[in-house]
Image: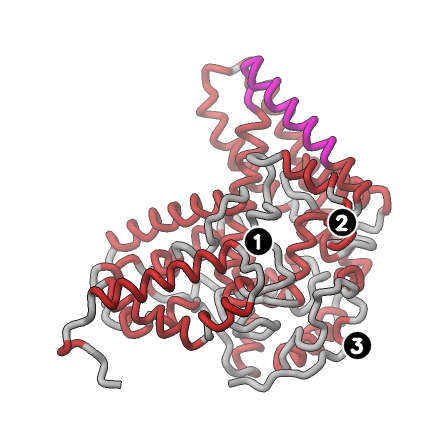
Amino acid sequence: MQEKSLSSSPEVYGDFQDYQKFESHRRLNKQEMFDRQFMDFMNWFKRDIHARYSKKDFQRIELKSLTTLLSGSIGLVISYVLLHHYLPQYALLWGIPMFAGAVYFGIQGEVMHMRTHSPNNLTGIRWLDKAIDYFGLALTGISPGLFGRRHLSAHYNDISSLSKIFSEIWITFDKVPISYYARPHLLLKFLLNQQFCEEEKINRKTLLIETIAFYIYLTVLVTELFFGSYFLLVFHLIPGFLLASSQIMSGTIVHSATDSQNSFESNGLMDYRTAEGLFKVPLWFYGLFNNGFFVNHGIHHAYPQVPLEIVTNDYRRYHEYILDHYTDVRYNKVLTHRVQADLLARLGPPNLFDYVVAFFCSLLGLFAMMLTVLGLPVPPTIFEMLLVDYRIYFVSTPTERMLNRIAFFESVRLEERYRQIAKPNVYMEFVYARYRRMKEYVKKHPLPASTQNPA
């Protein structure tokens, strides 16, 4: 087991704008945010980045991203007006490339996420940064302020997916969703809850303006549909929702681990080019929409202000450095690979049909994540085993799979920790209830004596 750091060196992250904004949160555990290996990489990574880029370069790149998003959106609006007016009978023909264009510009405009990490100065233009805060929710469906509250806790405490279910600082998606299309009333609920805004460091003035802008957006969307047009729905809302869901799915895979602090176990490295078996498929598919999250997200945790395109363009060198210099690096693996290792070992090489099925499994996983992003009580990791390799269900029995999961939950003291939590979150309740059901099931359906592990 890796040696844990008892405290984190302030010079490593002391100039991080996002940390400065969040460090006074009363539930933030400042003592164990990074393990020693990850902290060593943070120092090396900052030196490497600033040997080539300044913070002014960061602002220039983020300004370019925002310009791409805005100019692309304007271009799509003009194209739609002309095509919808003059060629409505060929809507499918021109609609497909327009939808692809909307996805492309949405991927390039990764500004809402990065604004949470640069709350003081993202683009170098103060009024433009404030416009992102005020109109980001209407423009992309994501509130920089509300998203940032959860995201920052997931950067400095409770990094892994397992640690989040025990967390006292991370907020579940049913409480604060990513997208508010299905539950826009929550914005008013947050706005009227002064205590929530004060405790969670939400600027109520900013929240008021972005809520008004979002409600105006929804009104315009409904009005447009009423008059027989569909630009906002088809070429704005749906592409943005697809990107947000894919990115959260990607983040869930990157953090599919047990470590509560930043380490190379909690921040996994993923790359579909080097992945093996059917797990390559979801890494490739979600990678089409996630702005390089698989290859850049774990590294992004080491210096969150660095524009993602810098990391993505040089990720192979960073992956190679990490794999060469550090131990216990989680590479192209998630918790299922660890928990169900003995069952996955029974599988042979996949064939073409298996890859086709894996693609549809990836679609199912993305649909489930869409429900999670909207704030429904659907755990983000619910289909992880299906994404790793669906064939596991055909080479093993439910009892075998459950025994592995029970053994894992007992190794992390699930029962004990559940009873210590005064108010378990919705995912903790789900996991614990599932754990109890699995124990009941294996009692009623034990393995045959000849197949039980003597150990």
The percent position of residue 219, horizontal first and vertical second, equals: 65, 23
Sequence-first disc among 3 and 1: 3
Answer with the quarter of the image where residue 207 lies: top right
Magenta residues, dominant SS class: helix
Query: What distance separates the C-alpha of mark 3 from that of mark 1?
Result: 31 Å
372 with respect to 305 (left or right): left
123 with respect to 89 (left or right): right
Query: Could you tell me which residue is drawn at 44 percent across and 56 percent down?
Result: 430
Q: Which mark is residue 12?
A: none
Q: Which mark is residue 172?
A: 1
Residue 374 in the magenta stretch? The answer is: no
Sequence-first disc among 2 and 1: 1
Query: Could you tell me which residue is drawn at 73 percent across and 51 percent down?
Result: 115
Question: Amino acid type of disc 1?
Answer: Thr
The residue under label 3 is 11
Sequence-first disc among 2 and 3: 3
Residue 213 in the magenta stretch? The answer is: yes
The residue under label 2 is 195
Q: Classify mark 2: helix, strand or loop.
A: helix
Q: Classify mark 3: helix, strand or loop.
A: helix
The percent position of residue 10, horizontal first and vertical second, equals: 78, 76
92 with respect to 403 (left or right): right
Q: Decide if residue 269 is in sight here.
A: no
State the extent of the magenta-drawn residues as a range: 211-230
Assess disc 1: are there few (<14), some (14-19) or many (≥20) residues with their C-alpha within 10 Å of its C-alpha.
some
106 with respect to 162 (left or right): right
Relative to residue 373, is residue 224 depicted above or below? above
Q: Is disc 3 in contact with disc 1, using a CB cutoff of under 8 Å?
A: no
Question: Amino acid type of disc 2?
Answer: Gln
Q: Residue furthest right?
A: 126
Query: What distance separates the C-alpha of mark 2 from that of mark 1?
Result: 18 Å
The percent position of residue 75, horizontal first and vertical second, equals: 65, 30
